[in-house]
Amino acid sequence: MRAGVLWPDRHLGVEERPVPQPSPGDVLVQVSAVGICGSDTHYLRHGRIGDHVVTAPLVLGHEAAGTVVAVGDGVATSRIGQRVSIEPQRPDPTSAESMRGDYHLCPHMRFYATPPVDGALAGFVTIGAAFAHLVPDEVTDEAAALFEPLSVGIAAVRKAAVGLGDSLLIAGAGPIGLMCVQVARAAGLARIVVSEPDGLRRARAGEFGATEAIEPGAEVSAVDAFIDASGVAGAVTAGLRALRPAGRAVLVGMGADTMDLPVSLIQNREIVLTGVFRYANTWPTARALVTSGAVDLDAMVTAHYGLDELAAAFDSDRIPGMIKAIVHPNLSHAEVPPNRKAHS
């Protein structure tokens, strides 16, 4: 099979690799669609994210979907042929975190495209059978791949603890910010404010359900919750100041390792400040939101690439108006249907 590989010198290319074999409890998935995430481009441009450093060739990509083509021992052969969305996690089921339901915080986690674990930009991948989630026929391969970033949005809105009639400020209208907008709309929030410097992204926020799309610096006050999907220190401070007393702030965006925070404000208003690191138990919710039409993932796909176009796919986040690029690992550029070609 072919795989998209990042080398430690930050060279990105395609190489031939053997098809992996499913271990007991695993399924083998032929990959049909992979979304390009900001973490993928960060590894390419910087060679690391925090303590995770690319020191050996690494297959990138963790937003993935495909079809089960083989199973390991202990997995029913009836799973062969199923279309699935991949939850790209391998926690230790015996860890204290997994046992209490927080498997995404397992200290022994092996997560796709996090060094040294290879990701999904390949013809085939293996994953634990329980983490290959069945998707119905009406869900496209591209949407099934985007259950992963949708899960981040679900986890963030859950942490924000908002619901019918509540108000929410979201900083950043990139893919994760827009996922949060759609989830918040589905949850019945009355007011969804998005702060974003880019005019094209502000417009898209309105299309996906934001009730207000503002430039950073515009005054917002007394919202029930704040989600930062930007990683920008100034946006975090502004969001905290916009909260009502006892409001909740959720940090999702990956920015600086440290930042100054208005501690007296947090104390005096008794603001609850927390973070989001991946997700747990979100795929059933993602499937329900998409199949019901409450969330539209296909509308977030703005470009398609074959595996031989990796450089262009990874640079596509610099194209104005781009939201989410999809790579088809088993297709070349010539094989991607004309109506699904990348565009600028």
Image (spheres, rainbow, N blue to C red):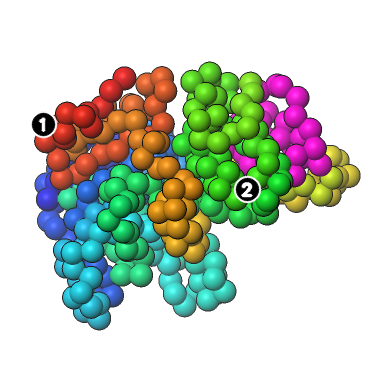
On the rendered structure, is 20 left or right of 144? Answer: left
Could you tell me which residue is drawn at 68 percent across and 51 percent down?
164
Farthest residue in the right direction? 268
On the rendered structure, is 322 left or right of 260? Answer: left
Q: Which residue is disc 1 drawn over?
A: 334
Camera-nearest label, 2 or 1? 2
Residue 298 at x, y percent in the picture: 36, 40
Residue 303 at x, y percent in the picture: 30, 30
**For residue 75, which quarter of the picture?**
bottom left
User: Is residue 244 placed above or below 79 in the rendered structure?
Assistant: above
Tag on residue 188? 2
Q: Amino acid at mark 1?
A: Ala
Residue 150 at x, y percent in the picture: 46, 48
Could you tell me which residue is drawn at 53 percent across and 76 percent down?
99
- Residue in the foreground of this view, choosing between 184 and 313: 184
What stretch of residues is rendered in magenta? 216-244
Reply yes or no: does residue 232 show up in magenta: yes
Q: Amino acid at mark 2?
A: Gly
